[in-house]
Structure formats: C-alpha cells, structure tokens
Image (cartoon, rainbow, N blue to C red):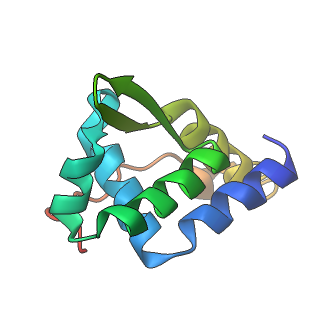
Amino acid sequence: MDPISAVRALAALAQESRLAIYRLLVQAGPAGLVAGQLGEALGIPAATLSFHLKTLAHSGLVSHRQEGRYARYSADFTAMHALIDYLSANCCGADRSVCLPCEPSIVKEIPA
C-alpha cells in the first residue's frame, strides 16, 4: 500500500459513523450487508448512510454490488490487511519479538 492510499483509508475511518459502519461490515464477513440493514442496525438515515458508504468505497475499504434493487456492501479484506501491513511494517525496528501477531479481542457488540 502506498502512503496516499493509507491516508485515504485512515481518513475514511476517522469519523464515528463510518468507523461503526466499517466494523459492522467486517463483522458481517464476505457476505456483507444490504444498505438498509446497515442503516437499521446503526440508526443512520438513508441519505447520511449513502454519504458515508460512498466515502468508504472511495477509500477502497468497502466494495458494493447490485442485487436487484438493493446494494450489498462488504468490507474489502485485502485492503484492510494491506492497511494493517502498511501500519505495522518495520514495527519495533530490530526487536521483532515485541511485534508478534496476537489474537484480536472479541467485541460482543458494535456501538452505534
């Protein structure tokens, strides 16, 4: 990942509603969610949700596909891992023992 793409992705996530949307899409896995499900789950009005989804899609972190009348959104896991790799490249300099992979904490619910 290049620095410009990393900044674009981080900027997209640097807003509370977009971060909540993204975390919900990550939780949903590759199947993703229909826009209406996202709005309902997070209590975000359709117009506002559309704006946030467009920003996330432009960042490359989210993709969408049409299913008839509905748009299904999903997290782009390749882009997510590329961002994580970019952020953790050269972690701790020569002491790689500090940067060993760890299990993510389990989040029971995603706050709105």
Q: Nearer the viewer, residue 78 or 75?
A: 75
**Relative to 111, residue 97 above or below:** above
Nearer to the camera, 59 or 99:
59
Along the line of sight, the residue nearer the viewer: 92 or 6: 6
Point out residue 75 in the picture as x, y percentages from the top left corner.
44, 40
Residue 48 lies, in percent from the top left, at 41, 69
Image quadrant in which the N terminus is located: top right
Quadrant (top left, top right, bottom left, bottom right) of the C terminus: bottom left
Residue at horizontal 16%, vertical 65%? 109
Residue at image point 74% right, 53% down: 6
- The residue depicted at 35 percent of the width and 35 percent of the height is 71
Indicate the position of residue 79 as horizontal and vertical percent values. 60, 37
Say whether residue 93 is visible.
Answer: yes
In the image, 67 versus 110, the foreground residue is 67
- Which of the 4 image quarters holds residue 55? bottom right
Q: Quadrant of residue 85?
A: top right
| Residue displayed at 38% across by 26% down | 66
**To which quarter of the image does residue 82 belong?**
top right
Residue 57 pos. (x, y %): 57, 45
Q: Looking at the picture, does residue 14 appear above or below residue 94? A: below
